[in-house]
Amino acid sequence: MLARWNTQSSNDVRAMPNIEYFAPWFRSEAVIRSMPYDQWKSLSPHGQRISRYVMCGKNEVVIGAGYIHPKSKMREAYKAKQLAELGSDAAAEYLHRL
């Protein structure tokens, strides 16, 4: 399912929370691990349990995590800088996971 969230009434970045649940028996390569470990550690035990399959490893980089800017060009430039710092092989592997 693809959903597009639209906020035409604002020029500012606004939080658009979204959560998706899967059946406990469901496993898929399409589920992207995208939650930084430090953020996962700050969750309650219940929060950690239900998000354990989207948590990244302790030293794993999550490109773009924690960076908020109202201009998409600035966000994309930040992500590009992070990918460049990873190096071409690691960046290609990271992008392949997405």
Image (tube, rainbow, N blue to C red):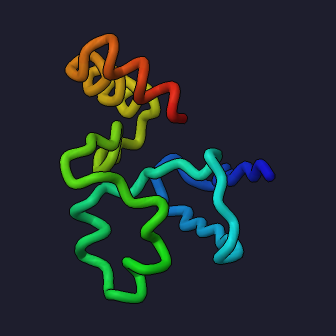
Total numbered labels placed on residues in the image: 0
Looking at this view, is 73 or 85 the one in front? 85
Q: Quadrant of residue 22?
A: bottom right
Residue 83 in percent (x, y) is at 31, 23
In the picture provided, is 3 more to the left or to the right than 16? right
Residue drawn where x is 33% and y is 43% of the image? 62
Furthest-front residue in view? 25
Residue 79 in percent (x, y) is at 35, 29
Location of residue 89 with respect to 86 vertically, above or below: above
Residue drawn where x is 21% and y is 54% of the image? 58
Furthest-top residue in view? 88
Residue drawn where x is 37% and y is 77% of the image? 48
Location of residue 51 with respect to 61 vertically, above or below: below
On the rendered image, what quadrant is the C terminus found in? top right
Location of residue 8 with respect to 64 vertically, above or below: below
Residue 3 in percent (x, y) is at 75, 52
Residue drawn where x is 27% and y is 60% of the image? 37
Residue 14 in percent (x, y) is at 48, 59
Location of residue 44 with respect to 42 vertically, above or below: below
In the picture provided, is 89 more to the left or to the right than 72? left
In the picture provided, is 93 more to the left or to the right than 60? right
